[in-house]
Image (cartoon, rainbow, N blue to C red):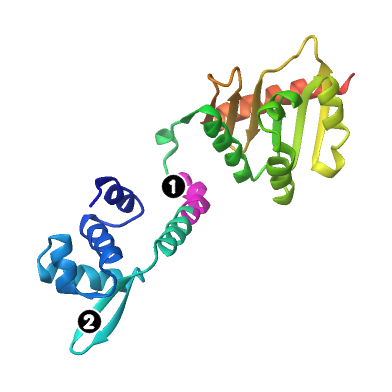
Amino acid sequence: MAADLLHILRSVGLDQKEAALYLSGLQLGAAPASEYAKAAKLNRITAYNTLEGLARRGLVTVAKKARAKWYLPVPPEQLSIEARKNADALSRVLPELRSLQGKDHRRPVVRYFEGWEGIRRVYEDTFTAKSELLNFANSAVVRTYWPNYDEEYVGERVKQGIRLRGIAPDDEAGRRVHGEDKKRLREIRLVPAKDFDFTNEINVYDHKVAICSFGSAQNMFGVIIESKEVAETQRQIFEMAWRYAGKR
């Protein structure tokens, strides 16, 4: 039984015995507790009690055959759905959980992501925004690496009703993107490209600051800083730049 599979199952809420029995069940199919116990190398009583617990949680089904109970694990896809439900539920209550912490115990959270897939994860986090996105970006750079950016990212942002105010270099790409502002739930102000040729992208939302550094294909990374103080300072810096851009 692969150790990495056990580890993954434990990470979604199964303990060691539950994970071992679930994996055994995928290989056995419907079987009595005694066969599960043998396959998972557990004693029969432990296997029976653990399977009953999994049944109460809806992770195995139970059928009676003759005088014995036979157990069958739910498909892995169902387990994945349950794990996502738990993760989504936790995400929804994070603000409430954080509010329970004493002010003196709250510390900034910094998450680092490497490579293009890491940068995609940073963009995905912006979909959690309850406030508008405040954005410094070079309109051409991200679209160079992500040809379907407008359809996949901007389209999803619009679908979720997340508004954006952005500052971008006044170049061909910036003007083209700016021309689509109304249908893209955004307002972009352009600044001289010769003075402000951004290569990094910064998004400020809620209590977060997300930074994507493109640099080169071999040296991409993203950072999410979660701190009320840092986000508020960056928000004020954006507003100062926004006023400057509005005078052009």
Name of the residue lying farthest toward the left: 43
Q: Is residue 246 above or below residue 42?
A: above
Q: What is the magenta range?
A: 88-100
Q: Earlier in the sequence, mark 1 or mark 2?
A: 2
Q: Is residue 95 magenta?
A: yes
The residue indicated by pointer 2 is 69
Name of the residue lying farthest toward the top: 194
As shown in the figure, which amino acid type bears the numbered disc 2?
Lys
* The image quarter in which residue 193 lies: top right
Name of the residue lying farthest toward the bottom: 66
* The image quarter in which residue 78 lies: bottom left
Q: Is residue 17 left or right of residue 56?
A: left
Q: Is residue 206 left or right of residue 181?
A: left
Query: Label 1 crowding class (10 Å Cα cut-off): few <14, some 14-19, many 20+?
Result: few
Choose mark 1 or mark 2, whichever is in front.
Answer: 2
The residue indicated by pointer 1 is 100
Seen from the viewer's position, the closer of residues 32 and 244 is: 32
Rendered location of residue 66, percent (x, y): 20, 90
Rendered location of residue 238, percent (x, y): 71, 25
